[in-house]
Image: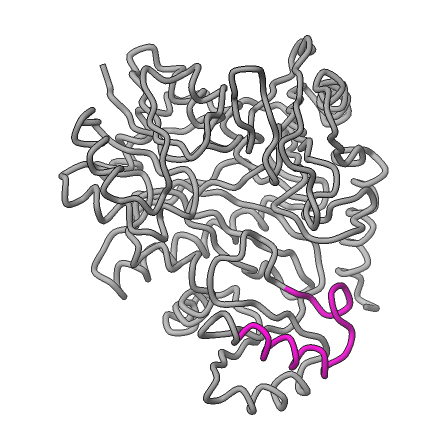
Amino acid sequence: MAKILLVGNGAREHCIAETLKRNKETELYSYIKSKNPGIVSLSKDFEIGNYNDLEKIKIYTEKIKPDFTFIGNEEPLNNGVVDLLKELNTDSIGPTKNLARLETSKSFTRNLLKKYKINGNPKFEVFNKNNINDAKDFIDSLNQCVIKPDGLTGGKGVKVQGDHFFTKKEALEYCKEVLQTHPIVVVEEKLEGEEFSLQCLTDGKTAVATPPAQDHKRAFDGDKGPNTGGMGSYSCENHLLPFLTKRDVEDGLKITQKVAEAIYKETGEFYKGIMYGGFIVTKNGVKLLEYNARFGDPETMNVLPLMETDFVGVCNAIINQKLHQIKIRFQNEATVCKYLVPRGYPDNPAKSGKIEIGKIPKDARIYYASVEQREDGLYTTSSRAAACVGIAENLEKAEKIAEEATKSVKGKLFHRGDIGTKKLIEKRVRHMKEVLSPNK
């Protein structure tokens, strides 16, 4: 019997819990910030607490003595939970705080690729309060730019010229604004192309790609509205995307493999866990937008339900650096994930709204996100509420299943109905053709 501790309480972690529990020899324990009914139903026991309460996490870990811990989200990684568990001689799927800088520090990752001459970097410069006056010249040298705070922002801190601001003067002003709350700001050239998420499993020596997915950050249909933590995503039955080639995926994996090797050279530590690369296909090849040090949310729901290989076995291979010895298989099916979120999300979300789950359609799955189970029912928080996932032999069928599933959840919620639809996919394909056009 494998005793596993899961840290995290969102839809991503609900999906991770479900995948671990497919192994009948698994005893799951969970440390969660709020009472997620999906995770609780799969756990033998659970503890509610904050992810910065290291003493509470320590006491709970010592009580249950897990064989390993799976860290679901970035907050506990940034708080050094893996470092704490190392002191307790407990293995983890997830990097130490030092290695989690891959996600928590944009400048660390950019400089790592630069130092080890790894393909994928755009033009970039790093600024702080001492050299911010130099930012103007660099911004002026770029056609358009992207401004990134150096640190965690919940997917909402990055601002792109043409979307969030329009002039180079505004770019400089936002740089100065970022430096009021962050020590460093990264300025990058704006890349033109289509984005894809490539979530890789790594033991520090070997990296294995899961099927690529495409996330949708904007709140409203047609890619309108403010950036969110992610309104949904899709993946295809051929383990590519309509605008993506096999070579693009191979290039993304190659970058990740080299970054894993560079991390060991730079720090002397092996990175064991998930390296989730946000990539973009441009006319100059595949470029890296950013790394996350854990599975994506929503992209987890596109890949883990398709995993045929025993996930507990995969985790043990990561811990023991034997990933090269196993073949990880995924079903050849398409998936569409649509997030139900509180009205007003993300800027002014309605809180503590009661939701009710009705009959879930066949072939659909619902993963609970930032909800709280109370004595009189299920309530939303200020973040995403539930992920509705359709799985089918093709994208059209998967989208219909996901859309139907959204109707089984009642409450003051909304979702993006266009995710995974033919109309939006064709728009992506047209855009990619324009980008790759020799006349562009």
- Outermost residue to the front: 376
Question: Where on the picture, by quarter, is residue 357?
Answer: top right
- Please state the horizontal and vertical placement of residue 313, each as a whole percent of the image: 30, 25
Q: Residue at x 49, y 20 (%)?
A: 38
Tell me: 214 left or right of 416: left
How many labels sit on residues? Answer: 0
Q: Residue at x 57, y 46 (%)?
A: 197
> For the N terminus, which image quadrant?
top left
> For the C terminus, which image quadrant?
bottom right
177 drawn magenta: yes
59 drawn magenta: no
Range covered by the magenta-colored residues: 159-179
Question: Where on the picture, by quarter, is residue 61?
Answer: top left
- Please state the horizontal and vertical placement of residue 287, each as a whole percent of the image: 57, 61
Tell me: 390 left or right of 121: right
- Please state the horizontal and vertical placement of residue 23, each as a whole percent of the image: 35, 15
9 w.r.t. 284: above or below: above
Residue sitting nearer the eye, 323 or 381 = 381
- Please state the horizontal and vertical placement of residue 97, each as a whole percent of the image: 30, 55
- Colour pattern of the rendering: one colour
Q: Residue at x 67, y 69 (%)?
A: 190
83 w.r.t. 89: above or below: below
